[in-house]
Image (cartoon, rainbow, N blue to C red):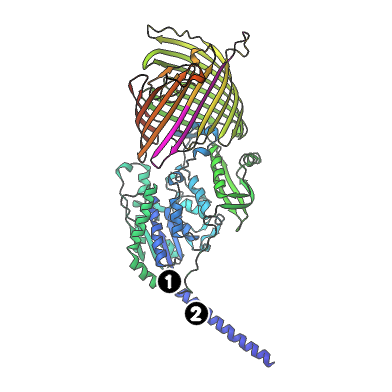
Amino acid sequence: MSKKNEFLKNFNRLLILFLIVFHISSNLYAERPKVGLVLMGGGAKGFAHVGALKVIEEVGIPIDYIAGTSMGAIIGGLYSIGYSADAIDSLIQNQDWLHLLTDEIYRYNLSSTTRDKAEKFIISLSYEREGIVVPSGIIEGHNIFNLLLDLTTNYHEQMDFNDLPIPFSCIAADIYSGDEVVLNRGSLPLAMRSSMAIPGVFSPVKKDSLLLIDGGIINNFPVDVVKEMGADIVIGVHFEKDEIREELAGSIMAFAHNLNNFMGKEKYNQNVEDTDLPIKVNLGEFTVASFRKQEIDSIITIGEATTRSHIEELRKFRDNLNLTTENRPPKIINSYIGEDSLKLSSVQIEGLNDIEIDFILKNFPIKLNTTKTDLHNTIANLYGTELFSKVHYRLENPQPPYDLILEIEKENFNSLNIGVRFDNIDRASILLDTDFRLRESYKSKINVTTRLNSSPYFTLDYSLYRSMAYKGNLRLKASFNDIDIYEKGDIAYNLGFYTYSANLNFSGFYFYKMKVQLGANIKHYHHSYELKKSLNKSLDLKSKPLISYYVNGNYDNLDRRHFPTKGVYFDFIYQLISANLYDPDNKKPIQDFRFTLTKPIKLDDKITITGNLKGRSLISDNIPFILSNMVGGQWDCHYTNQQIALEGLKGMEVMSKSVLKAELSFKYNFHRRHGLQADFNYTFYDNKPFHIINDKAFWGSTLGYIHSTIVGPVIIRLNYSERTHKIYPFINVGYLF
């Protein structure tokens, strides 16, 4: 009995001792003031927060709560789940922000059909039977949202943000009520995306009954929010008021640039007053739109330097916290930071019917052992089909393997694409293009395209897809051509003719960046007029049909159609051409072989060298004039399908049966979107393809200025050729088509 009493007595002593230690340690932690960090919104200026965080970490100030708006929400959200200032810095520096902040799809992710249409149009309008569909924002924000999903693995599901390693809140505004919305629960990446939805720039985000936009219009510096979360003292990083730069005045960017200068100003001033340690960063010439790499680096540096100028205040701030080993928060460990691999248990699709889901899983398979890089590439490929308006993902399950859920919405609108070009040859040109699908099926599509200028055309194309790897199509085309034929720089003929064609591509195979097509084509040329110099003989043009059977192969992974900097382009076509389906006179058909090879090499950020080989050879003793090799002009196939551009010549000249052009192009970007270009070409020609390298060759060159704009390239250049011994100017505004 005495032993039992002794045991109880010792147990009670240990229990009392434990309670005393627990009470003391709890009091020690509770006695430390809780620190709140507030990060102001401001587009690219928000990168200054990273520099500020570096100094705060260096001083050793623990952060207990974070609140932010817009870019401050993105930086703060990442910091709250364990990203260090250095990790965020590295992440920011490695992004292509000009791509992320658009809905642009890299050219290599576009489907073959979409790639052929890229860089031709400046306006794309969606329409339904009721009329034009007005977008809710210029940018949907797909690219930035998928990056946020990438960076927040394990935080996609609904959750309370108070349960994050550092409790976090971000600010949005509801369009319907005009009220401030504090986002402190839900999906973390969706909350961050909602907080940066600048009105008129990014589309708003739907959340339950709310339609959310950038919280900066109401509360761009949410000190009051972080205090409500429980912060006793607050460090806040904010920015000087912006001045509208002259080149931005009147633009949407100017509106976004100064949004918080006229809304929420009173609350902003009060929040600055309520900040215990405000750090005001003056970024001078840098604005919300300063997303270029050099600008980002400078903004981070200025943020760090400004915060470092407050280092004595920060140290005093830290010392007043009474930090101990017991009351300092533990280091956050996020094992998913920088991890690319993804282990999945299932792949599910929401938003589509069973047939559509089967179509996607067959054509865009996702392995259960995959990577985020491969997943993003698949999502970009889905966008590249132009079949879907939304392709997002989320990962469910607290630990891998995850259930991958693809949230997909169909593109329900038909599109009208408009291209405009002005130059000193055609004067003004307009290109109109529209796609629509029959019964909302992925397996068929109709395309109508028309060009309006001095040589107009109209095409009607019906495509039938068995899969993304196989397509057949029927194309009908009617065109009128008014062309000048030159002879050593002087006009020899002016021809006018109509062309009516039907092209049946009955076997088109598509594999990654390659395609192979087998088909037949019938063309009828109707000659309208022939004007010539008095001493020139008549071309004796005849109106008649020509039938051809062809095989066409293509490989294309260039990063852009105009002025590429990387990738390879190769295209060839071999066809047999005759006047009849069968030839009773046993005349051999005309053999037509042509090819193009383009390879750009980027030497550095400013200099790109591009090599180009293009050739065509005809084998026959009787070739109609309309099929002759025609060389000259500013771009291939401008007037005729066989036209080989040769910038040194003012217009098209007729060459021998075999032609080969070798060209080197040098492009130097001396300032942002401004560049100089010099081209040097050598053209060989002969009636026999194996004798084409001879002394009849001639050289040409161009020197010009290029400016990339939202409406396409502005080109001003001078052309010279040894064949003509004359200089010709070329001026163009807009995409070439």
Relative image position of residue 340 (x, y in whole percent):
55, 52
Relative height, residue 419 to residue 584 (above, below): below
> To which residue does mark 2 refer?
24
Looking at the rendered structure, the secondary structure element under dot 1 is loop
Where is residue 565, by image quadrant?
A: top left
Q: Is residue 562 visible?
A: no
Q: Secondary structure at mark 2?
A: helix
Q: Which residues are magenta?
A: 584-613
Quarter holding the C terminus? top left
CA separation in Å, label 1 and label 2: 16 Å
Q: What amino acid is labelled 2 in the image? A: Ile
Position of 96 with respect to 239 (left or right) is: right
In the picture of the structure, the residue carrying the numbered disc 1 is: 33
How many neighbours does mark 1 have within 10 angstroms: few (below 14), some (14-19), or many (20 or more)? some
Residue 360: x, y in percent?
62, 40
Residue 693 relative to residue 673: left or right: right
Res 319 label: none
- Is residue 646 among the parts visible in the rendering? yes
**Mark 2 surroundings within 10 Å by alpha-carbon count, few (fewer than 14), some (14 through 19), many (20 or more):** few
Mark 1 is on which residue type?
Answer: Pro
Q: In the current view of this chain or complex, which residue is farthest to the right?
A: 1
Numbered-mark total:
2
Query: Residue 225: where, in percent of width, then height?
Result: 43, 61
Specify whether residue 370 is painted magenta: no
In front: 170, or 500?
500
Q: Nearer the viewer, residue 215 or 284?
A: 284
Q: Which of the two labelled residues, at mark 1 and mark 2, occupies the earlier sequence position?
A: 2
**Magenta stretch secondary structure, dominant:** strand
The location of residue 7, given as percent across then percent down, is 65, 88
Looking at the picture, tell me which residue is in the foreground, 209 or 12: 12
